[in-house]
Amino acid sequence: GGGNESIGLEFQVDVDFTYFLLQDEIGELHKELASNYNNIIVSRAKDAIKNEAIFVTFTEYFQARQQVEERFRVAVQKRWEDRPSLHCELDQFHLGRIRIPESVATKQLQSRVQNERNDKEEFLQQAQLERELTAVSVNAINLEQQKVLRTAEAEASL
């Protein structure tokens, strides 16, 4: 993956795709690429995905999968258009499983857990503040009540 947050990070993505050989060009395909055409098609697809992957951030792989899949699909299509022609057309394309190193997964999990702890602490502090503000309001109401009662008693005794 690429981007500032994942420089040097290496991980694997599973990609499944299907393609059609262009019927009118099958003769040229065998003349130019012989029976090795499938290896060349797959090699160019891998090349395209690797070259595009460096521009995708770590987070995008997990939060914007459809956009990443489309970026890879477009990259493969463009790479297949390079000379010499592959005489094929991309059909289905699917971004599958994304595997990251265990150390990265652990670090991401620890980061998420710390964020949860921070949120919990913030919530507890806000709750304590609300309790204290409520206590102040209750005290002000009680003081007002005592003032009204004493005033009423004083006026009644006159």
Image: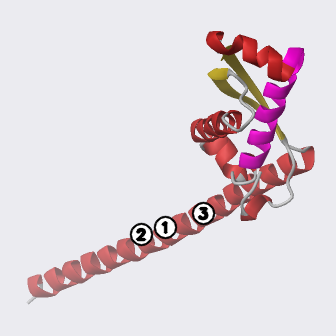
Secondary structure at badge 1 equals helix
Residue pointed to by mark 3: 124
Q: Is residue 104 above or below residue 127?
A: above
Q: Is residue 152 left or right of residue 84?
A: left
Q: Tell me if residue 35 is in the magenta stretch.
A: yes
How far apart are the alpha carbons under marks 2 and 1?
A: 5 Å
Comparing 4 with 92, the one in front is 92
Q: Is residue 93 left or right of residue 1?
A: left
In the image, what residue type sits under mark 2? Thr
Q: Is residue 52 above or below residue 17?
A: below
In the image, what residue type sits under mark 3? Leu
Q: Tell me which residue sits at (53%, 64%) in the image.
A: 127
**Residue 134 marker:** 2
Look at the magenta stretch and give its main secondary structure.
helix
Q: Is residue 21 left or right of residue 157?
A: right
Q: Tell me which residue sits at (69%, 43%) in the image.
A: 61
Residue pointed to by mark 1: 131
